[in-house]
Image (cartoon, rainbow, N blue to C red):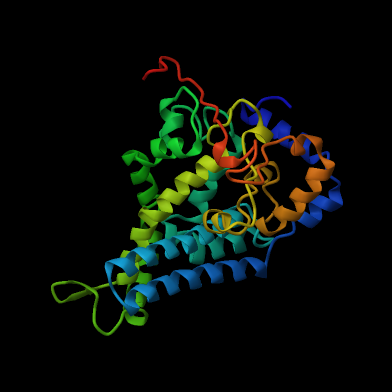
Amino acid sequence: MEPATSKHTVFEELRNFRSKIPRDKLRNWERPEGWEAVRKFTQDWAIILASHRIFTYHPSVLTFVAAAFLMAWGQRGIACVGHDAIHGNLASHRKVNDVITNIFLAPPLLSTATSQRKQHSLHHHLLGTKEDPDHGEDNETSLKHCRMGKVGQMNMFSLFLIDVIDPPFWSTYALADLKDAFVPLTLWWTIVYFLSLWLLEPAEAIFTIGSIRISSFVILFHTARCTVSYCCYVFREIIDHGGLDPKSGVLQFGRVTPWGSLFQVYFQPHDDNYHLLHHALPRIPMSNLRPAHKWLMKNCEDYAKANHYDTYFEGSHALFTEQLFAFTKPGVREND
């Protein structure tokens, strides 16, 4: 396949890939999730609320940290379901997807369906090009190693240390779309703030400013979001695309990572580990990615030759022992 060097080339590659799959298969795979999506984000919100309950039952530094890690798992879950929603994979009608997203999925992460779709569509349409907002060279919204350029061979853990310690990227993540959607996001969080004080706070306040009770739920939620969830987000971005040649094409600039482990369930919940397949066929809901993957591995040579990993550390093609491609930015020398 031709390398993905422009929006036009990306579309051509994806059109060619779809043409190799029977239409009845695509119709079956691309059926919206419906109530399965509701089950997923209900489960994720239950994890978030249970996390808060762990902390309020016995407030301490230890339970706060434990609750933050557990809450980050729920946040990763709603982020994945929200990601499916902006692709129209929850319901047949776009407005239904947007209503669900704007009530349950996007505002918790300081975003909206519209702002998420606008940003994420560019990532799909411009994947592997310099204009890719997530992994493009010199884009101020890209990961640090993409913005700065890096030479020499690395593994995912060294790349993570480069990318996670990045104050500009962290601040962009923490503030998200608050500036562009200030009114609806402020309104959503004001309602949640007072509801949490009324329904979730113990009789004896945990956090106060003078005589004013402060919502421990809001404090815990955003602490988890801006620390543990941020680290998970950066590492997941690296797992999805980091260290791959951006000029290699859609099917080579993404990964399918091991399925079924505790690591995958935490970092890539709801079968988010099939990211390569998601880019090839973005209208497939996450719950249908695994059966689609199995069929394509047997029936599509281009897909079977792509970046698939069955283990994390064992074997010659383990995910975390892979030596990563590192493009050289003009003017950057090897010892920089």
Please state which of residues 232 and 106 is positioned toward the viewer in this rendering. Answer: 232
**Is residue 159 shown above or below 183?**
above
| Image location of residue 43, percent across then percent down | 55, 70
- Which residue lies most toward the bottom here? 203
User: In the figure, is residue 263 to the left or right of 258?
Assistant: left
| Image location of residue 10, percent across then percent down | 66, 32
* Residue plotted at (84% across, 42% down): 299
* Residue plotted at (80% across, 57% down): 28
Q: Quadrant of the N terminus?
A: top right
* Residue plotted at (51% across, 52% down): 114
Please state which of residues 328 and 261 is positioned toward the viewer in this rendering. Answer: 261
| Image location of residue 117, percent across then percent down | 54, 48
Residue 288 seen in render:
yes
| Image location of residue 195, percent across then percent down | 36, 77
**Is residue 140 shown above or below 24?**
above
**Is residue 160 shown above or below 263?**
above
Q: Quadrant of the C terminus?
A: top left
User: In the figure, is residue 55 to the left or right of 33?
Assistant: left
